[in-house]
Amino acid sequence: MKKFKVLTILKIFLLSILLLLILRLVSTDFMPTMAENKPKIAIVIDDFGNNQEGSLEMLKLPIKFTGAVMPDMPKSEKEMNLLLENGKEVILHQPMQAHTGKVSWLGSSPILSNMSIKEVENVFKKNKEQINKAVGFNNHMGSLITEDREKMESILKIAKESNWFYVDSVTSSKSVAYDVAKSLGVKAVKRDVFLDSTKSKEKVKQNLRKTIEIAQKKGSALAIGHVGAEGGKITAEAILEIYNEYKNDVEFVYASQLAN
Ligand SMILES: [Zn+2]
Protein backbone atom coordinates (compact mmCIF):
# COMPACT_ATOMS: atom_id res chain seq x y z
CA MET A 1 0.00 0.00 0.00
CA LYS A 2 2.75 2.40 1.05
CA LYS A 3 4.81 1.53 -2.03
CA PHE A 4 1.76 2.17 -4.21
CA LYS A 5 1.28 5.67 -2.69
CA VAL A 6 4.91 6.59 -3.25
CA LEU A 7 4.66 5.45 -6.86
CA THR A 8 1.50 7.52 -7.40
CA ILE A 9 3.11 10.62 -5.93
CA LEU A 10 6.15 10.04 -8.11
CA LYS A 11 3.94 9.68 -11.21
CA ILE A 12 2.05 12.89 -10.41
CA PHE A 13 5.33 14.68 -9.84
CA LEU A 14 6.81 13.51 -13.14
CA LEU A 15 3.60 14.31 -15.02
CA SER A 16 3.59 17.86 -13.58
CA ILE A 17 7.16 18.40 -14.72
CA LEU A 18 6.26 17.13 -18.19
CA LEU A 19 3.23 19.43 -18.30
CA LEU A 20 5.34 22.41 -17.23
CA LEU A 21 7.91 21.64 -19.92
CA ILE A 22 5.21 21.39 -22.61
CA LEU A 23 3.63 24.68 -21.44
CA ARG A 24 7.02 26.37 -21.58
CA LEU A 25 7.72 25.13 -25.09
CA VAL A 26 4.27 26.18 -26.29
CA SER A 27 4.54 29.66 -24.76
CA THR A 28 8.04 30.40 -26.09
CA ASP A 29 6.87 29.20 -29.50
CA PHE A 30 3.82 31.38 -29.64
CA MET A 31 4.71 34.46 -27.60
CA PRO A 32 7.13 36.01 -30.13
CA THR A 33 4.57 35.68 -32.93
CA MET A 34 2.01 37.43 -30.77
CA ALA A 35 4.47 40.25 -30.03
CA GLU A 36 5.47 40.51 -33.68
CA ASN A 37 1.87 41.14 -34.68
CA LYS A 38 1.63 44.23 -32.51
CA PRO A 39 2.43 47.55 -34.20
CA LYS A 40 5.95 48.65 -33.27
CA ILE A 41 6.68 52.14 -31.96
CA ALA A 42 10.24 53.45 -31.69
CA ILE A 43 10.78 56.71 -29.83
CA VAL A 44 14.04 58.61 -30.17
CA ILE A 45 14.66 61.24 -27.48
CA ASP A 46 17.10 63.89 -28.72
CA ASP A 47 19.45 66.30 -26.94
CA PHE A 48 20.74 64.19 -24.03
CA GLY A 49 24.16 65.18 -22.65
CA ASN A 50 23.47 68.48 -20.91
CA ASN A 51 21.35 67.57 -17.87
CA GLN A 52 18.40 69.18 -19.58
CA GLU A 53 14.94 69.54 -18.09
CA GLY A 54 13.01 66.27 -18.16
CA SER A 55 16.08 64.00 -18.54
CA LEU A 56 15.39 62.14 -15.28
CA GLU A 57 11.70 61.71 -16.09
CA MET A 58 12.64 60.22 -19.48
CA LEU A 59 15.13 57.79 -17.92
CA LYS A 60 12.43 56.52 -15.55
CA LEU A 61 9.96 55.70 -18.37
CA PRO A 62 9.03 52.00 -18.27
CA ILE A 63 9.52 51.60 -22.02
CA LYS A 64 12.34 50.88 -24.45
CA PHE A 65 13.49 54.03 -26.22
CA THR A 66 16.60 55.36 -27.96
CA GLY A 67 18.45 58.30 -26.40
CA ALA A 68 20.44 60.53 -28.76
CA VAL A 69 23.44 61.99 -26.90
CA MET A 70 25.15 65.22 -28.00
CA PRO A 71 28.96 65.05 -28.00
CA ASP A 72 31.21 67.43 -26.05
CA MET A 73 28.57 68.39 -23.48
CA PRO A 74 29.22 68.51 -19.71
CA LYS A 75 27.16 65.35 -19.10
CA SER A 76 27.61 63.50 -22.40
CA GLU A 77 29.40 60.53 -20.88
CA LYS A 78 27.33 60.44 -17.69
CA GLU A 79 24.00 60.50 -19.53
CA MET A 80 25.21 57.92 -22.07
CA ASN A 81 25.86 55.56 -19.14
CA LEU A 82 22.62 56.46 -17.35
CA LEU A 83 20.62 55.65 -20.49
CA LEU A 84 22.25 52.22 -20.72
CA GLU A 85 21.82 51.54 -16.98
CA ASN A 86 18.12 52.28 -17.39
CA GLY A 87 17.76 49.82 -20.27
CA LYS A 88 17.67 52.39 -23.08
CA GLU A 89 19.58 52.36 -26.37
CA VAL A 90 22.19 55.04 -27.15
CA ILE A 91 22.95 56.80 -30.43
CA LEU A 92 25.20 59.76 -31.21
CA HIS A 93 23.25 62.99 -31.82
CA GLN A 94 25.56 64.46 -34.46
CA PRO A 95 25.16 68.25 -34.73
CA MET A 96 24.94 69.40 -38.35
CA GLN A 97 24.44 72.82 -39.83
CA ALA A 98 20.89 73.85 -40.70
CA HIS A 99 19.56 76.33 -43.27
CA THR A 100 18.44 78.57 -40.43
CA GLY A 101 19.43 78.98 -36.79
CA LYS A 102 22.64 79.99 -35.08
CA VAL A 103 25.83 77.94 -35.49
CA SER A 104 26.23 78.37 -31.69
CA TRP A 105 23.21 76.05 -31.21
CA LEU A 106 25.29 73.24 -32.70
CA GLY A 107 27.75 72.91 -29.82
CA SER A 108 31.48 72.47 -30.32
CA SER A 109 31.59 69.45 -32.66
CA PRO A 110 29.27 70.20 -35.57
CA ILE A 111 29.53 69.33 -39.24
CA LEU A 112 29.48 72.61 -41.16
CA SER A 113 28.93 73.29 -44.85
CA ASN A 114 32.32 75.01 -45.29
CA MET A 115 34.29 71.99 -44.01
CA SER A 116 36.38 69.78 -46.25
CA ILE A 117 35.53 66.07 -46.43
CA LYS A 118 38.63 65.33 -44.36
CA GLU A 119 37.44 67.76 -41.64
CA VAL A 120 33.94 66.24 -41.69
CA GLU A 121 35.41 62.77 -41.25
CA ASN A 122 37.63 63.88 -38.37
CA VAL A 123 34.78 65.55 -36.46
CA PHE A 124 32.54 62.52 -36.90
CA LYS A 125 35.28 60.07 -35.88
CA LYS A 126 36.09 62.11 -32.76
CA ASN A 127 32.41 62.25 -31.71
CA LYS A 128 31.99 58.58 -32.44
CA GLU A 129 34.92 57.72 -30.17
CA GLN A 130 33.46 59.87 -27.41
CA ILE A 131 29.89 58.49 -27.49
CA ASN A 132 31.53 55.09 -27.67
CA LYS A 133 28.64 52.99 -26.43
CA ALA A 134 26.35 54.19 -29.23
CA VAL A 135 25.06 51.78 -31.86
CA GLY A 136 24.05 54.39 -34.40
CA PHE A 137 23.49 58.11 -34.97
CA ASN A 138 20.98 60.73 -36.00
CA ASN A 139 21.26 64.40 -36.85
CA HIS A 140 20.82 67.37 -34.51
CA MET A 141 19.33 70.11 -36.75
CA GLY A 142 21.12 69.44 -40.08
CA SER A 143 18.63 70.58 -42.73
CA LEU A 144 21.58 71.89 -44.79
CA ILE A 145 24.02 69.00 -44.35
CA THR A 146 21.51 66.18 -44.89
CA GLU A 147 20.93 67.61 -48.39
CA ASP A 148 24.67 67.28 -49.09
CA ARG A 149 25.27 63.88 -50.71
CA GLU A 150 29.08 64.00 -50.49
CA LYS A 151 29.23 64.92 -46.79
CA MET A 152 26.57 62.40 -45.82
CA GLU A 153 28.37 59.73 -47.82
CA SER A 154 31.65 60.39 -45.98
CA ILE A 155 30.13 59.98 -42.49
CA LEU A 156 27.83 57.10 -43.40
CA LYS A 157 30.86 55.19 -44.69
CA ILE A 158 32.50 55.60 -41.27
CA ALA A 159 29.25 54.53 -39.57
CA LYS A 160 29.18 51.42 -41.73
CA GLU A 161 32.63 50.32 -40.53
CA SER A 162 31.18 49.94 -37.01
CA ASN A 163 27.89 48.48 -38.25
CA TRP A 164 26.07 51.59 -36.96
CA PHE A 165 22.54 52.37 -38.09
CA TYR A 166 21.21 55.80 -39.02
CA VAL A 167 18.00 57.61 -38.12
CA ASP A 168 17.16 60.35 -40.63
CA SER A 169 15.36 62.94 -38.48
CA VAL A 170 14.12 64.45 -41.78
CA THR A 171 14.69 68.06 -40.77
CA SER A 172 14.67 68.82 -44.51
CA SER A 173 12.16 67.48 -47.02
CA LYS A 174 15.09 67.39 -49.48
CA SER A 175 17.25 65.18 -47.23
CA VAL A 176 19.21 62.63 -49.26
CA ALA A 177 20.63 61.02 -46.11
CA TYR A 178 18.27 58.04 -45.97
CA ASP A 179 18.82 57.18 -49.64
CA VAL A 180 22.60 57.57 -49.32
CA ALA A 181 22.54 55.23 -46.30
CA LYS A 182 20.55 52.63 -48.25
CA SER A 183 22.87 52.84 -51.26
CA LEU A 184 25.88 52.24 -48.99
CA GLY A 185 24.20 49.33 -47.24
CA VAL A 186 23.85 51.16 -43.90
CA LYS A 187 20.76 50.17 -41.94
CA ALA A 188 18.48 53.19 -41.74
CA VAL A 189 15.06 54.41 -40.66
CA LYS A 190 13.23 57.70 -41.17
CA ARG A 191 11.38 59.81 -38.65
CA ASP A 192 7.58 59.73 -39.09
CA VAL A 193 6.45 62.18 -36.40
CA PHE A 194 7.97 64.98 -34.31
CA LEU A 195 6.35 64.76 -30.88
CA ASP A 196 6.99 68.09 -29.22
CA SER A 197 8.33 71.65 -29.60
CA THR A 198 5.11 72.68 -27.87
CA LYS A 199 4.10 73.62 -24.34
CA SER A 200 0.93 71.52 -24.58
CA LYS A 201 0.98 67.98 -23.21
CA GLU A 202 -2.27 67.29 -25.07
CA LYS A 203 -0.55 68.16 -28.35
CA VAL A 204 2.29 65.70 -27.57
CA LYS A 205 -0.31 63.02 -26.78
CA GLN A 206 -2.06 63.77 -30.08
CA ASN A 207 1.27 63.31 -31.88
CA LEU A 208 1.84 60.00 -30.07
CA ARG A 209 -1.63 58.83 -31.14
CA LYS A 210 -0.75 59.84 -34.71
CA THR A 211 2.43 57.72 -34.41
CA ILE A 212 0.35 54.74 -33.24
CA GLU A 213 -2.08 55.20 -36.16
CA ILE A 214 0.81 55.14 -38.65
CA ALA A 215 2.21 52.01 -36.97
CA GLN A 216 -1.19 50.33 -37.11
CA LYS A 217 -1.26 50.99 -40.87
CA LYS A 218 2.30 50.12 -41.84
CA GLY A 219 3.43 47.90 -38.97
CA SER A 220 5.83 50.36 -37.35
CA ALA A 221 6.52 54.06 -36.84
CA LEU A 222 9.29 56.24 -35.44
CA ALA A 223 8.74 59.42 -33.44
CA ILE A 224 11.28 61.95 -32.16
CA GLY A 225 10.93 63.89 -28.91
CA HIS A 226 13.31 66.00 -26.86
CA VAL A 227 14.65 66.66 -23.40
CA GLY A 228 15.02 70.36 -22.58
CA ALA A 229 12.98 73.37 -23.63
CA GLU A 230 11.58 71.72 -26.76
CA GLY A 231 9.87 68.96 -24.76
CA GLY A 232 11.28 67.69 -21.48
CA LYS A 233 8.86 66.87 -18.67
CA ILE A 234 5.77 67.44 -20.81
CA THR A 235 6.97 64.91 -23.38
CA ALA A 236 7.91 62.35 -20.68
CA GLU A 237 4.48 62.69 -19.02
CA ALA A 238 2.68 62.37 -22.35
CA ILE A 239 4.65 59.21 -23.24
CA LEU A 240 3.86 57.66 -19.84
CA GLU A 241 0.14 58.38 -20.17
CA ILE A 242 -0.02 57.01 -23.73
CA TYR A 243 2.00 53.97 -22.65
CA ASN A 244 -0.53 53.22 -19.89
CA GLU A 245 -3.36 53.59 -22.39
CA TYR A 246 -1.88 51.47 -25.20
CA LYS A 247 0.61 49.09 -23.55
CA ASN A 248 -1.39 46.02 -24.56
CA ASP A 249 -1.92 47.17 -28.16
CA VAL A 250 1.54 48.31 -29.27
CA GLU A 251 5.13 47.27 -28.66
CA PHE A 252 7.75 49.88 -27.80
CA VAL A 253 11.07 49.01 -29.46
CA TYR A 254 14.53 50.54 -29.97
CA ALA A 255 15.07 52.54 -33.16
CA SER A 256 17.66 49.95 -34.23
CA GLN A 257 14.86 47.38 -34.38
CA LEU A 258 13.16 49.39 -37.14
CA ALA A 259 16.31 50.09 -39.15
CA ASN A 260 16.75 47.84 -42.16
ZN1 LIG B 1 18.73 67.92 -31.37
Image (cartoon, rainbow, N blue to C red):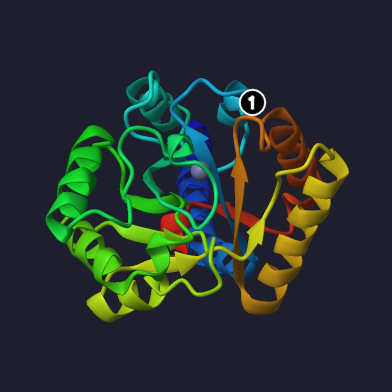
Q: Viewed as shown, does residue 53 lie left or right of 177?
A: right
- Visible residue check, residue 8: no
Q: Please give the name of the residue rendered at 32% of the width and 28% of the height, measured from the top-left corner.
A: 72
Q: Viewed as shown, does residue 159 lie left or right of 68?
A: left
Q: In the picture, residue 84 is in which quadrant?
A: top left
Q: Residues within 10 Å of mark 1 (few under 14, many from 20)?
A: many
**152 and 34: which is toward the camera:** 152
Instruction: Say whether mark 1 is within 8 Å of ligand 1.
Output: no
Tell me where residue 206 appears, x and y as whole percent. Answer: 83, 54
- Visible residue check, residue 212: yes
**156 and 108: which is toward the camera:** 108
Q: Please give the name of the residue rendered at 33% of the width and 68% of the height, measured from the top-left corner.
A: 187
Tell me where residue 16 appears, x and y as whole percent. Answer: 53, 47
User: What amino acid does circle 1 point to?
Assistant: Gly
Q: Please give the name of the residue rendered at 51% of the width and 49% of the height, measured from the top-left corner.
A: 20
**131 and 163: which is toward the camera:** 131
SS class of the residue under badge 1? loop
The quadrant of the rendering that contains the C terminus is bottom left
Instruction: Give the labeled residue for mark 1.
Output: 54
Q: How many marks?
A: 1
Q: Viewed as shown, does residue 122 lie left or right of 227?
A: left
Q: Viewed as shown, does residue 138 lie left or right of 165?
A: right
Tell me where residue 145 appears, x and y as whole percent. Answer: 38, 61
Q: Please give the name of the residue rendered at 68% of the width and 37% of the height, measured from the top-left corner.
A: 231
Tell me where residue 240 appears, x and y as whole percent. Answer: 73, 37
In the image, residue 216 above or below residue 90: below
